[in-house]
Image (cartoon, rainbow, N blue to C red):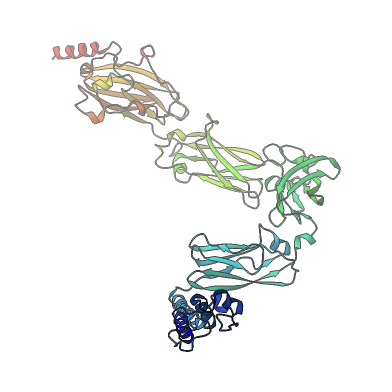
Amino acid sequence: MKRLALAAAIALGLLTFGAAPATAGDDHARSPVSAGIVEPASPDVVGEHGADSGLGQNEASEVRAAGPREDAGPADDADPTEQAGSTDAAESEEATETAEAAEPIDATFSLLTPELTPEEIRDPDRGIRYTIDGLKAGDTVTHSIGAGGPTTVPQDGLFEGTIVGDSEVEPGTTLDFTVTVDRNDADPVTFDGSVEVIGDESSDTSPALTVSPETLQLREFRSTGVSVTMTGCEPRTEVQFSAVFVDDPGTTTWEQTVSADEDGDAEATYRVDPDIDDGFGFIGDHLVDASCGETSAEASLTVTANDDDANDDDANDDTANDPTLTVSPESQQLTAFRQDGVTMTVTGCGPGEEVLFSLALQDDPSTPYWEETRAADDDGHATATFVLAEAADDGYEFIGEHLVSATCADGTAEATFTITPSGSGTIDPALTVDPTTIAGTDFVNENRGVQLTVRSCGSGRDSVRFEVWGTEPSALLFDRTVKVDEAGTASVRVFGLENRPEAYAGRYNVRATCGDTVLEGTFDVTSSSADDPDQTGDPGRAGSIPHTGAEITGLGAGLVLILLGAGAVIFARRNAQAGR
């Protein structure tokens, strides 16, 4: 009976063991029990429950049966190592397919600083600078040298990077490095670079000062000056320039502060301001000094008198270095002046100086009618030509004396020329009536009226007599003598006094007497502005005619058409009609 019970218990234990196999990696699987190492049951254990106890008998059976199953097949008892290996292979194959499908990194690497000093490599403001084009936002860039970790690319396109060295390098060596670009879905790309380590030339160069030219004439010293250059200073430091006389070192003649460039060089110009000094006091030997930091350098400069002043006993004569101006031709007729103009040439200015030419009428020298700037050549000469434009009125106002001036750094020179009437020396006088037809409403407007002008009434004649005659009847209505100006021009404006435009309608004859010459013209006054709107007077045109003689304004000066007013015209016409 005990054998049957024991057999049943063993069968039950085997069935239970087969239903729950040990799992790979479980702690119980590595215990002596799971490995099939079974210790004999302690007699105390058996005795505790008694020989007839079914529970104690079953537990002891299960412990003893905890060894490997002999009937476990491959499908029921798979090797955990083989299962993990197949999973890794599948993941690796999937990653390979993903990498093959990813777009490769297509980028271009450029090194911007192929040569650097050890100090520049370690300088955060300099460093090894490079660019990589073709990157995408999120890419990471890693250097093989230098401080700092990977850098994340902020945006697509061009990436600018800097490597700051963190180790000592010697001049004359080559510093090799790599730059690697990583992207999540692509293979990384590595670029090779190298920098030639050079020595710091500035640290071995002592400051030096040069002056160019070392000797020059006063004219050049005033116009272009001398170039003063300091080298060998620390980059971007202030350089103080100064100059003194060799025979008077206590008197400073020039000071200027300039910032050195990135190479430690600084340049300034030493010259005399031509607007405030004639420069004669600077003739002699100068000592030029430049300092930067705790170092300084000196150079010599000599300023000599101009060639034309070499034998002048009085070098301080203010006129010794003045420019000279010539005008050609000095006299010409108006026709030639309009066609060929006048040529002005100045000498005695400094090479390259700007020369301002100016023309004005002799009677109004403060109001130039033409100005132009020319650059002096290497000999200090400059030339300009003025031609009177054909469109500039008739040119009669240019008859007379003209003042020419030429100004450069060395001073101002002046000359004159004369424009005479065309022909044999005289020009026939001419009468202008403007307008020749005017509405009555404009004729009674004192700001309009009719302008009567005689030109070219020169050759010693002092005045022009203007007369206005009515045609119906023929009666003298206006008579006035006007002084001729310097250009031989006389002008007067006539208008009606009473505000009765219709009373002035009709034709009027004009007579102007210039010496023995009598000039005649006419003008018509219409009854209304609507009769001929295009022929109304223009008060603005009177001001454009040059005249300096008698411009008569007001009744007291006699500027009236018909001294007795419009009534006299009407009365005279009625008498003429009654007599027919």
Q: Residue at x 40, y 25 (%)?
A: 490
Front residue of this view, candidates 163 and 250 = 163
Q: State the quadrant of the C terminus.
A: top left
Q: Check the image and report above or below for 173 versus 422.
A: below
x, y percent for residue 310:
78, 47
In-image side of 331 versus 532 (left or right) = right
x, y percent for residue 134:
49, 67
Which image quadrant for residue 451?
A: top left
Q: Residue at x 44, y 75 (%)?
A: 98
Q: Check the image and report above or below for 440 versus 118.
A: above
x, y percent for residue 438:
25, 25
Front residue of this view, candidates 466 and 433 = 433
In-image side of 258 versus 368 (left or right) = right
x, y percent for residue 16:
45, 79
Res. 517 in view: no
Q: Check the image and report above or below for 312 versus 145.
A: above
Which image quadrant for residue 422?
A: top left
